[in-house]
Image (spheres, grey):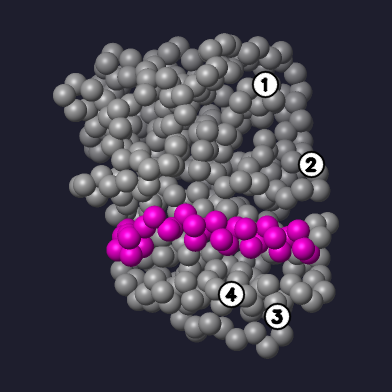
Amino acid sequence: MIETKTLLDLFTETRQRTEALCKPLEIEDYVVQPTIDVSPPKWHLGHTTWFFEEFILKKHKPDYRLFHEDFAYVFNSYYETLGERVVRSDRGNLSRPGVAKVYDYRHYVTNELKEFLTTTVAAEITDLLLIGIHHEKQHQELLMTDIKFILGNNPLLPKYNDTYEENPSSETPQEWLSFDAGVYEIGHNGDDFCYDNELGKHKTYCQDFQISNSLVTNGEYIAFIKDGGYKDFNFWHADAWDWVQQEKITQPMYWHEIDGVWHHYTLQGLQKVDNEAALNHISYYEAFAFAQWKGCRLPTEFEWEAAQDNFKWGTRWEWTESAYLPYPGYTKVPGALGEYNGKFMVNQKVLRGGSVITAPKHTRPTYRNFFQPNLRWQYTGIRLAK
């Protein structure tokens, strides 16, 4: 069990980091919502605060007084158990409460929780606090991808700042790593934090497989584009081909061809695409099509986990060929927290690894991210298998 002081330090560090990530923003940036999948930065600040208020302070701190009675309605995300909420697509209409008020809310809840933690804390509350901390770390990554989408869809393509490096060049020559057919143990097993969708540890049989030790680069993907990859239906699933046609998809998100040269929007502004850097902002649909074009495939999440000790990961979320499904014996926890993962186990693909903007002390080899196959505003890339 984690000591209260250690947990308090992690809580404080996490709360401060969220606000530090927002420092480069103009006040107007806090409210923009260009699309339903993107939430305004102000909403992230409030929602991560509401989580601690709702699940810990409101239920466990004696005589706790809500900061504002309407904030549960404003900042609840998808917890049906906890009542009505603002429709997701309307989060950008919340010009009130103002940014200053939301920061007041954050500081109020942070201080109330710190005070609460000076008393004897039961194991149940420690567990809730740890979930809340990692929930906020998840939202730090979402916050950054949403900020990038907001600024990347501004006609001026403004910088977030001058120092946020998100596209490191690959230093690993590409090799195929071979693994024999056999039974591999998958899933989390230990006392450190994990989400319920990583439990429980179980055995899975994998056939002989090979997996690349490096991610697909921008240069490799440009070759796919030049070869007409977006124009040949043979590489695409039927749903994916419909998506390509309807949305007029011809290149990765944030890419712009200027005078025959590929550029992309980054948090440091518009830059030339580095052919040696790992590909980024790719949907599962595109990842699958590229793999087909290469005569390869995507790894399953079980192959990825079995092999991950043998390659570097963590700069891009990596699409897998696995549907997001429960592990054997999975059961949702009772109450609202049971809605955290379980109800999303349909129509989504698993991603593994983490990315350059994943919060520190958050991801691990068994971490399972998941998104719909058309989404690409996250820092998603491709690792091939065969």
Where is mark 2, residue-wise?
A: 189
- Choose the circle earlier in sequence order: 1 or 3: 3
Q: Does the stretch in magenta take in 15? A: yes
The residue furthest bottom is 63
Instruction: Pick whichever, 384 or 108, lies toward us.
Output: 108
* Amino acid type of the residue that numbered disc 2 sits on in the rendered structure: Asn
Where is mark 3, residue-wise?
A: 61
* Amino acid type of the residue that numbered disc 1 sits on in the rendered structure: Asn
Report whether residue 186 is seen: yes
Residue 192 placed where, x, y %?
77, 48
Where is mark 4, residue-wise?
A: 109
In the displayed structure image, the side of residue 80 where residue 115 appears, left or right: right
Residue 259 placed where, x, y %?
16, 24
Residue 210 placed where, x, y %?
61, 14
Label 3 and label 2: CA atoms lie apart by 32 Å
In the displayed structure image, the side of residue 258 where residue 102 appears, left or right: right
Callout 4: helix, strand or loop? helix
Residue at horizontal 38%, vertical 47%? 161
Within 10 Å of disc 2 (Cα), the crowding (few <14, some 14-19, many 20+) is some
Callout 3: helix, strand or loop? loop
